Image (cartoon, grey):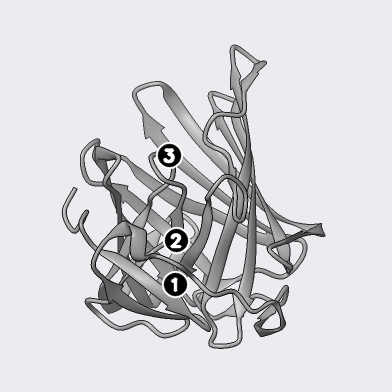
Amino acid sequence: MKHAALAFTVACGLVTTGAMAADYKPIIIPAEFSTTINNPLFNLPVGKLMVYEAKTDEGLERVEIRIRQETRKIMGVETVVYNDRVFVDNQLVEETNDYLAQHKDGSVWYFGEVVDNYKDGKFLDHKGGWIAGENGALPGVWIKGKQVVGDSYRMEYYKGQAEDMAEVKETGLTVKVAAGTFENCVKVYEWTPLDADSKEDKYYCPGAGGQALSVHLVENNRVELVKVASD
């Protein structure tokens, strides 16, 4: 995928361009992070519920995201549990606990995920999971505190298994989805050098306090926000 050669060095939450993937060495200072995630584009209070739907070749996909009460400490950082369940025609196919924390500069960092994969309603495996600080895995930025068009950054780094990248493409957009019309949205392009077909435009909106729309650029699927509420 494009920009696959980019890499970054991170210090105190700031991202700068490096020469190779080997140069990616984020310095994590736990005292600079918080479980209070209030980035306007990614606001995650405990109890928040976001529901998404998409029409796919496999059937109707529904994604339910809840912000759990519990936390988990990773690399000395207390993280929020972002529970993500994916259903296809009402059958659970994946459940993921993502671990997030907000840096003092407003950027939300991604510290790993535990994945449960299912097939025909039965547990299959944990493929796709990683935890920062274990087996060479490193945290990355889920979304920046300040949106600057052209800014690229690593979202995660687990060599050969989790190497998602992101680039801010546009700001000040209006996005209309089933849950409503949102303004001042930001379009973020996400890709990975591990899969040439994994290319998505994701739209984060202040009114939704999270992702309102995701468009897969190869499969042309649209995952739309249909509900946002608090439990």
Q: Is residue 19 above or below residue 98?
A: below
Please report contact status of discs 1 and 3: CB closer than 8 Å, yes or no.
Answer: no
Foreground residue among 60 and 137 = 137
Location of residue 115 in the rendering, given as x and y in whole percent from the top left corner = 62, 36
Residue 221 lies in quadrant: top left
Rendered residue at 49%/54% (across/down): 225
Q: Which amino acid, by three-letter code, is at mark 2?
A: Ala
Residue 118 lies in quadrant: top right
> In the drawing, what numbered circle is on residue 161?
3
Task: Rate crowding at label 3 as few (under 14), some (14 to 19) or many (20 or more) other CA atoms within 10 Å.
Answer: some
Please report contact status of discs 3 and 2: CB closer than 8 Å, yes or no.
Answer: no
Q: Is residue 141 above or below residue 198?
A: below
**Would you name the residue on which mark 1 appears?**
205
SS assignment at label 3: loop
Rendered residue at 59%/55% (across/down): 132
| Quadrant the C terminus occupies | bottom right
Front label number (3 vs 2): 3
> In the drawing, what numbered circle is on residue 212?
2
Please report contact status of discs 1 and 2: CB closer than 8 Å, yes or no.
Answer: yes
Location of residue 218 in the rendering, given as x and y in whole percent from the top left corner = 21, 39
Asked whether residue 100 is in view, the answer is yes
Mark 1–mark 2 Cα distance, whole angstroms, equals 6 Å
SS assignment at label 2: strand
Residue 72 lies in quadrant: bottom right
Mark 3–mark 2 Cα distance, whole angstroms, equals 27 Å
Q: Which amino acid, by three-letter code, is at mark 1?
A: Cys
Front label number (1 vs 3): 3
